[in-house]
């Protein structure tokens, strides 16, 4: 399962409304190689299902990840911060053994 914080839920709903996405739109989460710790998150809105997609729903938000990425983000929570130390989506990931100082990448 992948979870969504209340603040992230509110921000996702705001973006979906402002950008006039369809009801079929979901949040696609993937993990790619890169960053100073080795792996980075990629979060996008999507409406096209792929064969190995894993779907979850939390707080009314539909989330999707490919099977490989799911191994890295299982039991993670998508968060949103709007503060002095940065603004944007990020993850609280219990699988991450280490994260970089900027919070953009992680390793397991």
Image: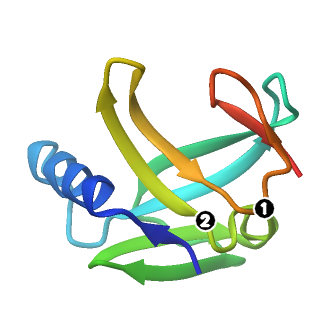
Disc 2: which residue: 76
Position of 70 with respect to 59 (left or right) is right
Residue at image position (78%, 40%) is 106
Corner quadrant of residue 88: top left
Q: Is residue 27 above or below residue 61?
A: above
Residue 96 position (above or below residue 82): below
Q: Looking at the picture, how far across and down is residue 8, in whole percent?
A: 32, 54
Do the CB atoms of the residues marked 1 and 2 lie less than 8 Å apart? yes
State the image coordinates of residue 62 (x, y, percent, origin top left).
38, 74
> On the image, numbered disc 1 is attached to which residue?
95
Q: Is residue 51 left or right of residue 45?
A: right
Q: Residue at x 69, y 63 (%)?
A: 73
Give SS at disc 1: loop
Measured from the top left, where is residue 82 in percent x and y? 28, 31
Disc 2: CA contacts within 10 A as few (<14), some (14-19) or many (>=20):
some
Q: Position of residue 7 (x, y in %)?
A: 26, 54
Task: Work out whether residue 97 or residue 37 is closer to the camera in this orientation and state it.
Answer: 97
């Amino acid at each position: 399962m992948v979870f969504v914080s209340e603040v992230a839920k509110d921000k996702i709903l705001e973006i979906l409304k402002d950008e006039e996405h369809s009801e079929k739109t979901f949040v696609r989460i993937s993990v790619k190689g890169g960053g100073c710790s080795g792996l980075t998150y990629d979060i996008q809105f999507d409406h096209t299902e792929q064969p190995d997609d894993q779907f979850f729903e939390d707080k009314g938000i539909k989330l999707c990840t490919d099977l490989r990425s799911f191994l890295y983000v299982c039991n993670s929570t998508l968060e949103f911060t709007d503060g002095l130390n940065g603004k944007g989506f990020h993850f609280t990931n219990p699988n991450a053994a280490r994260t970089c100082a900027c919070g953009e990448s992680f390793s397991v």
